[in-house]
Image (spheres, rainbow, N blue to C red):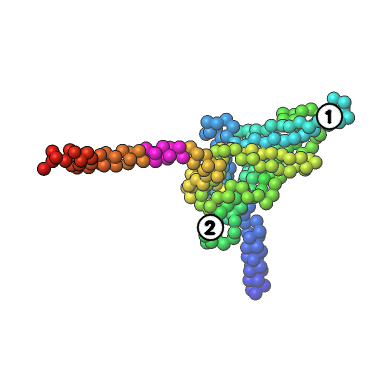
Amino acid sequence: MDICVSTQVLGLHLLLLLTYIVGPNMAEQEVENLSGLSSNPDKNIFAIRENGTTCLMAEFSARILVPYEVPSSNEVDWNLEEANIQLPRDTEIKGKCWNNESELHLSWADKSYTLKLFFIKDGQEAKSSGRSWKMNKIQFIYDLSDRTNFKSGARPGKHTASRHHLSLMVTPLGMSYECEASEKVSLTSTDQKKTVVLYLSEVHIQPFDIKSDFVYSEEYKCLTDQRKQLEETLPLILGLTLGVAIVIILAVYHVHHKMTANQVQIPRDRSLYKHMG
């Protein structure tokens, strides 16, 4: 009897240990490509749902500049070319959502290309004030054998361009990040350490704490958008301020003129005093 109980206890402990190790991967996750809802053909919309609830939402336009080499006309030297790769709408989506980390993986052209975005919460204390989330890592995998974007003769093979320890899109917890302006991120490639450049624009992302299904939380605008909004509204504010100042000056002048008009005017010429009294 004791052996049977011990076996059951041991089995329970093993089950709990297995759940702890692989628990994050056991959650049922669904992915949605909603890019067709965007009126901009270059803009993509993605969502990851876990157990029927949205855990990550992202929409943006992505363009990637990839330098690569092709043989020169003398067939001895190599010339540097640059491919301009646009993230297409027919993208395969994968992703993961955890308490403090989340990932979005986008693949296309039979997985010749894969763009991976990684997000993390700053700090570990769930109840600490002033916490935020950010994009902390980017990976872009590309295949130089793909002739859609790379010319014939390019050095063949897959390469990974990446950037770690980033602090992009830093946003207070419970809010979504929004930025209409284009943001540039340089990545270092395994292809002789060439620099691959990722451009993100029309960004709206929330990888944590989504309160309503398929609905972003309050937007936290990037500094570029805040500056642009200030530049657009500043002339209006100055105009209104100037208008109010003019109205006040005219009102004061009108009141002053009315008060002085009712006062008895004393002649400055003393010869005129004989007519008074």
Residue type highlighted by circle 2: Gly
Q: Is residue 219 left or right of residue 153?
A: left
In this view, which residue lies farthest toward the front?
271
Query: For this rendering, which residue is in front, 156 or 246?
Result: 246
Q: Position of residue 249 (x, y in %)?
A: 33, 40
Circle 1 sits on which residue? Answer: 71
Circle 2 sits on which residue? Answer: 130
Q: Position of residue 15 (x, y in %)?
A: 64, 62
Is residue 241 part of the magenta span, yes or no?
A: yes
The segment highlighted magenta reads: 234-243
In this view, which residue lies farthest toward the top?
73
**Residue at figure coordinates x 20%, y 41% from the top left:** 270
Q: Is residue 134 above or below residue 269?
A: below
Specify the quadrant of the image occupied by residue 117.
top right
Q: CA distance from mark 1 to mark 2?
A: 54 Å
Specify the quadrant of the image occupied by residue 69.
top right
